[in-house]
Image (tube, rainbow, N blue to C red):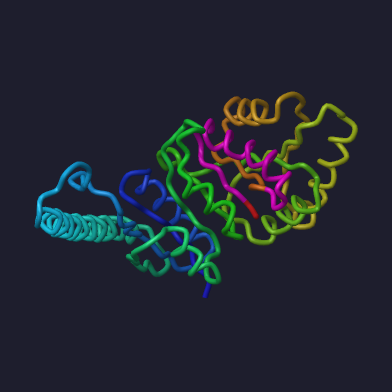
């Protein structure tokens, strides 16, 4: 059975991510799974084997390292369990579906991909607004997971308006069709923008988007923007009080990923509102 999966670490807007996950779980009538992954470090502050080591000292250091890692691991596991229990306690106040807690060990991407077949949408919190500090984990997850991903980078608010960046490609048409068929957010207004210096071409593309939504009797507002895509999208979002940005993610080919991947990274780094990525 499909589920809403929320990954939490206690640091990066975990509570906000969980709040969005509960709302989406209720909207889609799907169970919510909250996952905490324990990623074990292979480094230690006390491990220094440089210089001359006397007989027996290496064994003492390795034993101390093992003990230290064991203590750290137990503490991390406990903190993760405490976090999960606290999040579930709050989630149950408004959750209409089952809330399931999960704790796993190893690489976060590997653990997410193991659940890929049952994921309807992944919600994950991020904190950085610096493109040089966006975690590789986040980039890898967006590249590898072929499911919608909501990146939460601010405190939770109930969404009232969604901004959709639409480029008219076959891929983006599929995204709109999927979004119309299974709307993740209920009772929201939708603004759709296309960034193109050719206004007539842009209007034609947006007319196609209107037709897709018209089939489900959903009203949308469309706007033609020109200039730097990243700047125009973010400016429109803030000036028009949009609560969430929805867009496609990294491309599949190397050339597309180089161009669009860089654009995606910059949007993630500079947006101060949640971003919903479709694949």
Q: Residue furthest bottom?
A: 1
Report the number of discs: 0
Q: Main secondary structure of the magenta part?
A: helix
Q: Residue furthest right?
A: 200
**Residue at image x 62%, y 25%?**
235
Q: Hey, which quadrant is residue 243 in on the image?
A: top right
Q: Examine the rendered structure and indicate whether residue 203 appears above or below residue 1.
A: above
The residue closer to the viewer here, 65 or 50, is 50
Q: Is residue 32 magenta?
A: no
Residue 129 percent across, percent down from the top left:
47, 32
**Residue at image x 47%, y 53%?**
123
The residue closer to the viewer here, 275 or 209, is 275
The residue closer to the viewer here, 237 or 11, is 11
Q: Hey, which quadrant is residue 145 in on the image?
A: bottom right
Residue 147 percent across, percent down from the top left:
59, 59
Magenta extent = 251-277
**Residue at image x 79%, y 47%?**
209
Q: Is residue 81 left or right of residue 180?
A: left
Q: Examine the rendered structure and indicate whether residue 177 appears above or below residue 46.
A: below
Q: Is residue 142 left or right of residue 105?
A: right
Q: Quadrant of the C terminus?
A: bottom right
Q: Is residue 105 left or right of residue 177?
A: left
Residue 135 percent across, percent down from the top left:
45, 43
**Residue at image x 61%, y 29%?**
234
Q: Examine the rendered structure and indicate whether residue 111 appears above or below residue 214.
A: below
Q: Hey, which quadrant is residue 215 in on the image?
A: bottom right
């Amino acid at each position: 059975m499909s589920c809403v999966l929320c990954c939490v670490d206690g640091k990066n807007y975990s509570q906000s991510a969980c709040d969005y996950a509960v709302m989406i779980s209720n909207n889609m009538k799907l169970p919510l799974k909250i996952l905490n992954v324990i990623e074990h470090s292979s480094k230690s502050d006390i491990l220094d084997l440089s210089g001359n080591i006397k007989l027996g000292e290496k064994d003492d250091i390795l034993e101390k390292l093992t003990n230290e890692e064991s203590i750290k691991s137990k503490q991390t596991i406990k903190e993760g369990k405490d976090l999960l229990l606290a999040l579930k306690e709050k989630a149950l106040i408004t959750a209409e579906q089952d809330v399931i807690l999960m704790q796993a060990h190893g690489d976060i991407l590997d653990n997410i991909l193991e659940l890929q077949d049952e994921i309807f949408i992944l919600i994950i919190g991020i904190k950085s607004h610096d493109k040089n500090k966006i975690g590789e984990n986040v980039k890898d997850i967006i590249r590898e997971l072929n499911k919608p991903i909501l990146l939460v980078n601010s405190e939770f608010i109930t969404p009232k308006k969604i901004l959709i960046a639409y480029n008219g490609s076959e891929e983006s048409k599929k995204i709109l069709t999927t979004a119309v068929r299974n709307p993740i957010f209920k009772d929201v207004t939708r603004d759709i923008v296309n960034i193109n210096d050719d206004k007539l071409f842009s209007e034609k593309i947006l007319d196609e988007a209107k037709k897709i939504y018209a089939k489900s009797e959903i009203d949308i507002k469309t706007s033609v923007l020109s200039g730097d895509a990243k700047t125009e999208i973010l400016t429109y979002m803030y000036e028009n009080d949009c609560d969430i940005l929805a867009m496609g993610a990294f491309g599949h080919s190397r050339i597309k990923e180089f161009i669009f991947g860089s654009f995606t990274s910059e949007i993630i780094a500079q947006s101060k509102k949640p971003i919903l990525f479709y694949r």
